[in-house]
C-alpha cells in the first residue's frame, strides 16, 4: 500500500511574524522557514503506518518554489521513501490558494495512485483548513479530518479515524482510498537522525511543473494589502452600571 | 540623580556598619516579598538584623529553578562555613543605628529603605564606624558573592533598570546596571543584534552582575569574554567617587584601561552602575545538532574537528554525560530525549550561527556525516525547526535546575585542560561511590567543566570527601578552581589553588587602594589573611 503525504513550507512556528514595510505581505526574507507542524505530524503518521506494516511506501509531495525542496528533504530525512516537488514560484500578490493546491495534489494522486493521502489539517501561515477537504471532494474519496487516531485495516481496505470535533471525539470508518488530515494530538514527530539524513541524500525528488499535470492554477484572488491587527487598547474599569450602559450605548453603540 | 544619591550613600557608608540577614537569598525574598517595596528609587537599602553566620544557600543559583523547586520539595540550605574556615564578623565594622536609617531614607525616600521590622535592633553603640555593603543584582550567583555574611547593608540595584541608549548602527548598548539580561536580549534582538552572552539564569540576572562576575555562558566560544565586549562602565567607588568610564568607543588607548579591574571583581572594588556593551549582529541562520559519543576522547576529537570544519559558524559546543541526560529527562518539564535509543555515555550539543541557512546546514550536515564515518559520533539528530532546537537547549540548560530538584547539590566550576577534563568526574565517582551521583557537563569548547555532585541531603562527610580534593586536583593540573562563577564567599580562601602568592598580594594592594576601609563586599573574593 502506498501513502502520499503532502507537506508545506511555512514561516517557522516560533518566529514572531511581521508585516513587510510595503504591506504586500508577511516578511519572509531572512526568516526561518520550516515544515508546517501539522505536516510533520502527517509525515510521522505515515512513517508509523509503514513501520507497522500497513504500508509499503511513503511518498512526500509539496507545491512551492525551489527552496521547498528543503522541506521535502526534511520529510526524506525523517524516513519518507521518495518525494515529488511541484515547482511553483510564489507571487505574494497572487498566492496559491487551497483550491489550486488541491487540484495539483489530485493530479499527483492520480499519477501516484496511493491508497491513502495524509495532510496536515491546516497551514500555520494561512490557517485555511481547506486543502484536505477540497482534495477529497475533487477525488471523490472519503475524508477523515482532524484525526487524533488512525487505525488501518489493510485486508478490508478500511480506515478507522478518531476525529477531534467540538463536542468531543468522533469515530468514523472510511473505505480506502481516502484522505485524512492530522490534528495536533495524533503523534509526536520524530527527529531527523544522522543515519537517516545520510540515506536521504540518495533518495529521489521528482520535479514537475503544474502545466505538466494539466492543472490550471490561475488565481482568482488578488491580495491588495496586508496589515497588522490594530493594537489592543487598554481596558477601562467602570464604577457603576449606569456608566456601563452609557458606554455601551454611546461608545460601543451596541444598544 | 541616582549617581549623586549613590555617591552620598557610599560616602556615608564610610562610617557605618549594619547587621543584616541572609536577606539576599531567593528563599527569604519569597517570604519577605511583601516587605520589599519595589520603588522608583535607585537603590534598595535593606538593613535588617538576624542571627549571624546564617550562610547563603548553595542553591541560590538559578532563580526560576528555585521557585519551582520550592513548590516541589524543600530546597536544602547549606552553610558555606561548614568545612571552610570559620569567618568571624570583623568588629571594625560599625553597626546600623536609627540615624543611619533616617539618612538613607532622606536620600532614597521612605520606600527605598527596606527594613525587617521585627528584627530592627535599637541603637547600638557606634564603634569606629565603617558600614559594610554588599552590592546585589539578580541574585543568581553560585558562590555566595551577592549575599551578606553578617550584617552588611544590601545595595539592591534592581531599581536601576533603565536603558540609556542603543546605537543600532554599531550595535552599542548603554544601560543601567540593574537591567535583566533577558530584557536586554529582547530589546537588542528587535533591532537585529544579540547580547554577547547568554546563560541559563538570563531571566533574573542583571547585566551589572554579569559584568562584575565576568560571566561566561553559552556564547563564550563565539563572542569571547566580557573583557572584550564591554566598552565602558560607570562605577561608584567605596568613598563615593563616581568613576565615569562610560565610553562607547571601540578603541581607546589612552592610559591604563581601568574598567578591566572592575570586570570580574565581584563588587569588591566598586559598584557598577552603568554599562556599555558591544552587541554582535543577529545572524539569521541557526542550526542545532544533538549528538552522542561513545567516550570522552571522541568528544575531544569532535571539538577539534568542529573547529576546523565549522570554523566561523560554530557558536556553541556543550557536552554532558548520560547521568545529566537521565536527570534532565526525569526532572525538566516538557522535554523529550532526542536520542532515546542511544545508551551512549556522552552527549554533545553543537550550534552554528551564520548568515546563510542552506550553506550552514550543508556544512553542518557534511561535517556530522564525516564525523559519523570517522567514528567520532555514534548517533545524532539535527533540529529541523526552532521548536526542536529549543528542546535541545532546554535539556542542556535544565540540568542545573534538575539537579536542585533531586536534593543537595555541590557545584564546582573548573577550568581544566581539555584532555584531562573528564578525569576529575571519574575520580569523584570513585571517591563517592554510591553516596552521591556525580554529573559532569559544561562548555567543552572553553575547557570549562561544571561538576555537580547530587545527593539526597547535605552532610559534612560527603563534603569532606569532595573538598579539598577537587581543588587540589585542579591545582595540580594548573587549572582554575572557578572558571566563570567567581570566588564569592565560597572560594574566598581558596584563591591560592589557582593564583600565586605574589599575584594575590598585588590584588590585596589594589583592594586596599580602592577600598581602604574594606567596606565593599567584605569576606569575599580575597582571603582574610592578605587584607
Image: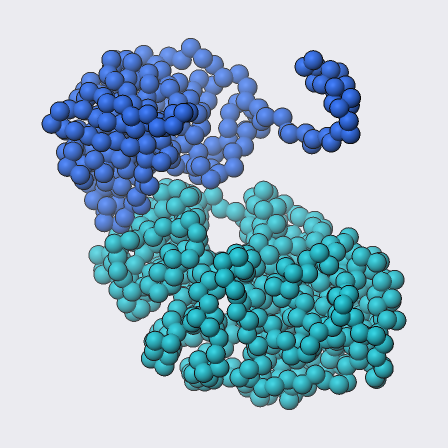
Give the quadrant of the N terminus of chain A: top left
Left/right of residue A202 with respect to residue A90 in the rendered view: left
> Which residue is drawn at the image coordinates 36% and 60% (left, top)?
B325
**Is residue B175 depicted above or below B474 in this figure?**
above
**Residue B366: x and y, percent?**
29, 50
**Residue B482: x and y, percent?**
51, 74
> Which residue is drawn at the image coordinates 76% and 70% (left, top)?
B119
Please, which colouring scheme is shown?
Answer: by chain
Give the color of chain A as drawn: blue
Left/right of residue B388 with respect to residue B21 in the rendered view: left
Give the quadrant of the C terminus of chain A: top right
**Is residue A194 depicted above or below A164 in this figure?**
below
As drawn, which residue projects farthest toward the top? A220
**Is residue A71 depicted above or below B224 in this figure?**
above
Residue nearer the viewer, A250 or B177: A250
**Residue B57: x and y, percent?**
57, 70
Residue B212 in sight from this viewpoint: no
**Residue A132: x and y, percent?**
32, 21
> Which residue is drawn at the image coordinates 69% and 32% (left, top)?
A234
Left/right of residue B209 with respect to residue B430 in the rendered view: right
**Is residue B316 depicted above or below A104 in this figure?**
below
Residue B119 in sight from this viewpoint: yes
> Which residue is drawn at the image coordinates 69% and 72% (left, top)?
B21
Residue B234's image quarter? bottom right
Residue B89's image quarter? bottom right
Chain drawn in cyan: B
Residue nearer the viewer, A47 or B482: A47
Residue nearer the viewer, A110 or A140: A140
Tag count in the figure?
A: 0
Residue nearer the viewer, A158 or B208: A158
Amino acid at each position: 500500500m502506498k501513502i502520499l503525504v503532502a507537506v508545506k513550507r511555512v514561516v517557522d512556528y516560533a518566529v514572531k511574524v511581521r508585516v513587510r514595510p510595503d504591506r504586500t505581505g508577511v516578511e519572509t526574507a531572512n526568516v526561518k522557514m520550516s515544515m508546517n507542524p501539522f505536516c510533520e505530524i502527517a509525515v510521522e503518521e505515515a512513517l508509523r503506518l509503514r513501520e507497522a506494516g500497513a504500508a509499503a511506501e511513503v511518498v512526500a509531495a509539496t507545491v512551492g518554489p525551489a527552496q521547498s525542496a528543503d522541506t521535502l528533504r526534511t520529510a526524506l530525512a525523517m524516513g519518507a521513501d521518495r518525494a515529488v516537488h511541484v515547482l511553483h514560484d510564489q507571487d505574494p500578490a497572487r498566492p496559491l490558494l487551497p483550491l489550486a493546491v488541491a487540484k495539483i495534489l489530485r493530479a499527483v494522486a492520480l499519477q501516484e495512485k496511493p491508497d491513502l493521502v495524509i495532510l496536515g489539517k491546516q497551514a500555520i501561515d494561512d490557517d485555511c483548513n481547506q486543502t484536505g477537504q477540497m482534495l477529497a471532494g475533487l477525488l471523490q474519496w472519503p475524508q477523515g479530518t482532524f484525526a487524533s487516531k488512525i487505525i488501518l485495516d489493510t485486508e478490508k481496505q478500511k480506515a478507522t479515524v478518531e476525529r477531534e470535533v467540538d463536542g468531543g471525539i468522533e469515530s468514523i470508518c472510511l473505505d480506502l482510498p481516502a484522505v485524512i488530515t492530522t490534528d495536533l494530538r495524533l503523534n509526536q514527530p520524530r527527529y531527523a537522525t544522522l543515519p537517516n539524513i545520510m540515506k536521504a541524500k540518495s533518495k529521489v525528488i521528482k520535479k514537475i511543473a503544474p502545466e505538466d499535470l494539466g492543472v490550471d492554477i490561475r488565481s482568482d484572488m488578488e491580495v491588495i494589502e496586508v496589515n497588522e491587527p490594530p493594537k489592543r487598547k487598554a481596558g477601562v474599569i467602570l464604577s457603576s452600571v449606569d456608566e456601563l450602559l452609557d458606554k455601551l450605548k454611546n461608545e460601543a453603540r451596541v444598544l | 540623580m541616582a549617581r549623586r544619591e549613590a555617591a552620598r550613600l557610599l560616602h556615608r557608608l564610610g562610617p557605618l556598619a549594619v547587621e543584616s540577614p541572609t536577606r539576599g537569598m531567593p528563599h527569604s525574598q519569597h517570604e519577605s516579598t511583601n516587605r520589599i517595596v519595589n520603588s522608583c528609587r535607585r537603590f534598595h537599602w535593606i538593613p535588617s538584623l538576624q542571627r549571624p553566620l546564617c550562610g547563603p544557600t548553595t542553591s541560590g543559583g538559578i532563580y526560576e529553578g528555585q521557585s519551582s523547586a520550592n513548590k516541589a520539595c524543600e530546597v536544602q540550605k547549606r552553610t558555606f562555613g561548614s568545612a571552610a574556615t570559620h569567618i568571624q564578623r570583623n568588629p571594625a565594622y560599625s553597626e546600623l543605628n536609627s540615624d543611619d536609617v533616617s539618612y538613607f531614607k532622606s536620600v532614597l525616600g521612605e520606600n527605598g529603605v527596606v527594613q525587617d521590622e521585627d528584627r530592627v535592633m535599637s541603637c547600638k553603640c557606634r564603634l569606629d564606624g565603617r558600614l559594610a555593603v554588599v552590592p546585589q543584582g539578580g541574585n543568581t550567583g553560585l558562590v555566595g558573592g551577592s549575599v551578606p555574611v553578617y550584617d552588611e547593608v544590601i545595595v539592591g540595584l534592581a531599581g536601576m533598570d533603565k536603558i540609556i541608549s542603543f546605537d543600532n548602527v554599531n550595535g552599542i548598548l548603554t544601560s543601567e546596571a540593574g537591567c535583566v539580561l533577558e530584557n536586554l536580549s529582547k530589546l537588542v534582538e528587535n533591532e537585529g543584534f544579540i547580547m554577547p552572552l547568554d546563560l541559563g539564569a538570563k531571566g533574573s540576572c542583571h547585566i551589572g552582575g554579569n559584568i562584575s562576575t565576568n560571566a561566561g555562558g553559552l556564547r563564550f566560544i563565539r563572542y569571547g569574554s566580557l573583557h572584550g565586549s564591554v566598552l565602558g562602565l560607570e562605577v561608584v567607588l567605596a568613598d563615593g567617587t563616581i568613576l565615569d568610564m562610560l565610553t562607547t568607543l571601540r578603541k581607546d588607548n589612552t592610559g591604563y584601561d581601568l574598567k578591566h579591574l572592575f570586570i570580574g571583581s565581584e563588587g569588591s572594588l566598586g559598584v557598577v552602575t552603568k554599562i556599555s556593551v558591544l552587541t554582535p549582529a543577529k545572524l539569521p541562520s541557526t542550526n542545532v545538532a544533538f549528538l552522542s559519543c561513545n567516550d570522552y576522547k571522541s568528544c575531544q576529537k569532535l571539538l577539534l574537528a568542529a573547529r576546523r570544519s565549522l570554523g566561523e559558524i560554530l557558536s556553541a559546543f556543550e557536552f554532558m554525560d548520560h547521568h545529566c541526560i537521565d536527570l534532565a529527562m526525569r526532572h525538566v518539564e516538557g522535554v523529550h530525549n532526542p536520542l532515546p535509543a542511544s545508551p551512549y555515555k556522552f552527549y554533545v550539543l553543537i550550534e552554528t550561527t551564520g548568515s546563510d541557512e542552506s550553506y550552514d546546514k550543508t556544512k553542518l550536515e557534511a561535517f556530522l556525516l564525516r564525523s559519523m564515518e570517522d567514528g567520532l559520533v555514534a548517533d545524532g539528530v539535527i533540529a529541523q525547526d526552532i521548536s526542536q532546537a529549543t528542546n535541545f537547549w532546554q535539556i542542556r540548560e535544565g540540568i542545573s535546575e534538575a539537579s536542585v530538584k533531586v536534593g543537595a547539590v555541590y557545584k564546582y566550576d573548573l577550568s581544566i585542560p581539555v584532555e584531562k577534563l573528564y578525569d576529575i568526574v571519574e575520580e569523584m565517582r570513585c571517591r563517592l561511590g554510591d553516596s552521591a551521583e556525580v554529573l559532569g557537563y559544561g562548555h567543552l569548547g572553553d575547557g570549562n567543566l561544571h561538576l555537580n555532585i547530587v545527593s539526597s541531603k547535605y552532610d559534612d562527610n560527603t563534603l569532606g570527601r569532595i573538598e579539598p580534593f577537587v581543588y587540589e586536583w585542579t591545582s595540580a593540573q594548573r587549572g582554575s578552581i572557578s572558571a566563570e562563577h567567581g570566588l564569592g564567599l565560597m572560594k574566598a580562601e581558596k584563591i591560592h589553588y589557582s593564583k600565586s602568592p605574589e599575584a594575590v598580594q598585588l590584588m590585596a594592594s589594589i583592594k586596599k587602594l580602592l577600598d581602604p576601609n574594606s567596606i565593599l563586599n567584605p569576606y569575599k573574593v580575597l582571603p582574610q589573611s592578605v587584607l
